[in-house]
Image (spheres, rainbow, N blue to C red):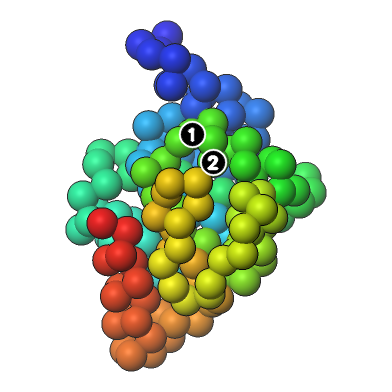
Amino acid sequence: MSSNIFEVTGESVLTLYGSHLTGAPTSALMVVSETPLGAPARAALEKSAASLEFGSAPLAVVVAETEEGKLGAEDARTIVEGLDPVALVATDAFAAELLSAAYRTPVTLDAPNRLLGRTAVIFEDFEGLLTSDNGKQCAWALLKKLR
């Protein structure tokens, strides 16, 4: 049994959205993508989270579209608020639109943003950036804004 109300809320969100969400109730960094990330992108985000000292259970990963359907804006907001991460990363334009709709505020692609007090780094195509050395440097420069 969880020791505090925040973990209980997080566990219930993980249970409710299990097909769209992996992580821990205490994940400090949430990554949102339209479809599952490839292994290189996932590894880069895990390494970045560790480098940026997001803790022992750093990543919660939200996949907006699974075999069970697509998440809507209210679902996205419920997940974010239920897990209450310190920061967010949107890895693609669809995830950016989803978070923009969830928080009813425009977001800027390939830039740091603020969403209800959280730092959010919004990428247009994170996986695409990882295909070149210059792109990797740009991605890392943005991810460092999460500090």
- Say which quarter of the image contains residue 28: top left
Left or right placement of residue 140 versus residue 6 in this view: left
The residue positioned farthest toward the right in the image shown: 69
User: Mark 2 Cα within 10 Å, few/some/many (few <14, many 20+)?
Assistant: many
> Could you say where residue 50 lies in the image, as x and y percent from the top left?
24, 53
> Could you tell me which secondary element the residue under label 1 belongs to?
helix
Residue at figure coordinates x 61%, y 64% from the top left = 106
Left or right placement of residue 57 versus residue 79 in this view: left
Residue at figure coordinates x 43%, y 21% from the top left = 7
Q: Is residue 111 visible?
A: yes
Mark 1 to mark 2: distance in Å?
Answer: 5 Å
Q: Is residue 61 visible?
A: no
- Amino acid type at circle 2 is Val
- Contact (Cβ within 8 Å) of mark 1 with mark 2: yes
According to the image, label 1 marks what residue? 83
Residue at figure coordinates x 54%, y 35% from the top left = 81
User: Number of callouts in the render?
Assistant: 2
- Amino acid type at circle 1 is Leu
Q: Quadrant of the C terminus?
A: bottom left
- Depth check, front residue: 122 or 136: 122
> Could you say where residue 132 lies in the image, as x and y percent from the top left?
38, 89
Asked if residue 79 is positioned above or below residue 112 in the image, the reply reads above
According to the image, label 2 marks what residue? 80
Residue at figure coordinates x 56%, y 49% from the top left = 62
- Depth check, front residue: 8 or 105: 105
Asked if residue 50 is positioned above or below residue 135 in the image, the reply reads above
- Depth check, front residue: 62 or 87: 87
> Could you tell me which secondary element the residue under label 2 belongs to?
helix
Asked if residue 22 is positioned above or below residue 13 in the image, the reply reads below
